[in-house]
Image (cartoon, grey):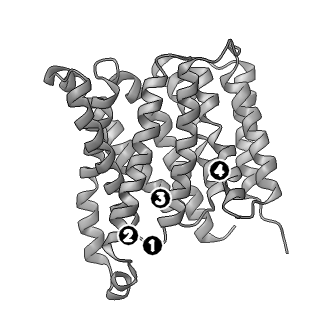
Amino acid sequence: MKTASMKGVIFLILAAIIWGFALVAQKAGTETLGPLTFTGIRCTLGSLSMFPLIVVLDKKKTLEQKAAEHHPATLLKGGFICGLVVFFFTILQQTGIQFTTVGKSGFITALYIILVPLGGLFLKKKVAKKIWIAVLIALSGFYLMCMSEGLTGINKGDIMMLLASLGCAVHIYVIDYYVNKIDPVKFSSLQFLVTGLISLVLALFLEDIYWNRIFAAAVPILYAGVVSCGLGYTFQILGQKYVEPAKASLLLSSETIFTMLAGMLFFQEMLSMKEYLGCGLIFFAIILSQIERKS
């Protein structure tokens, strides 16, 4: 594996780890705050936390690097579009989880790893056979991990999760389109500022906001905002500079494994044999996706 490709893989795995543990913060935060309020504060804080890094990185840029950047309008347009997509699937996830089980929602959301290569067909992008095999193995692993409770029937929460999965796939392709045209950190900051402001404006009209509830959820908000948004999505954007969309989606799907580990650490949740087997299948799929054919 090339050094640049390995760098991208590392960034994407780090993003998956961060998001896996972020579910603990999200679960704790939504006990006191509505989905719009929590998402609004979280994403706005995540965006603002990137400002110091943006200033530092700008000072280190060479004249050639600055000249290579596209017009600011490209950054603004891409950030706005990505912000809308992030708002779409984040609010659907936060709302949908109230009406369905964690196991079912995990499996349905994971469908984005197959929607990405399917989207590649519509965009006339070639998808390697090993990626398709890895996707099938990963989906089998997700089934074993997340469907041990059984599928008892689809409801409105399941529909919301399915739509959120579609949003995740679209997000990966939007990033892939803009990633080589913009500053990734500025792009990440802008997309979350858009998501945060939209959520906060809607929260003012649709939810009750109390300062004592916000302070009570301070720790979950800080992790979900600064770490999950600030670092996690920046790692995703940096990683996608070196990894193709289908492979990136598969690597990011390992988030579910780390979510289960977080559940064991914070909620003393134990895995069944089926769930352990599911973890093994997903790791195997990730390794398979990284094996390069010798010429």
Gap in angstroms between the C-alphas marked 4 and 2: 23 Å
**Nearer to us in this view, 27 or 105:** 105
Which residue lies at the image location 47% right of the left edge and 66% below the top edge? 178
Gap in angstroms between the C-alphas marked 1 and 3: 12 Å
Residue carrying label 2 = 74
Q: First in sequence, mark 3 or 2: give its number.
A: 2
Instruction: Kindly identify the amino acid type of the residue bearing the numbered disc 4.
Output: Val
Instruction: Kindly identify the amino acid type of the residue bearing the numbered disc 1.
Output: Lys
The residue most toward the bottom is 64
Residue carrying label 1 = 181
Gap in angstroms between the C-alphas marked 4 and 3: 16 Å
Q: Secondary structure at mark 2?
A: helix
Tags 4 and 3 touching, CB below 8 Å: no
**Nearer to us in this view, 129 or 165:** 165
Residue carrying label 4 = 116
- Label 3 neighbour load within 10 Å: few <14, some 14-19, many 20+: many
Q: Would residue 209 be seen by someone viewing this image from the given angle?
A: yes
How many marks are shown on the rendered structure? 4
Q: First in sequence, mark 1 or 3: give its number.
A: 1
Q: First in sequence, mark 4 or 3: give its number.
A: 4
Discs 1/2, front = 2
Q: Secondary structure at mark 4?
A: helix
Q: Is residue 137 left or right of residue 90?
A: right
- Label 2 neighbour load within 10 Å: few <14, some 14-19, many 20+: some
Gap in angstroms between the C-alphas marked 1 and 2: 8 Å
Which residue lies at the image location 45% right of the left edge and 72% below the top edge? 181
Tags 1 and 2 touching, CB below 8 Å: yes
Tags 4 and 2 touching, CB below 8 Å: no
Q: First in sequence, mark 4 or 2: give its number.
A: 2
Q: Is residue 86 above or below residue 69?
A: above
Which residue lies at the image location 71% right of the left edge and 50% below the top edge? 118
Instruction: Kindly identify the amino acid type of the residue bearing the numbered disc 2.
Output: Thr
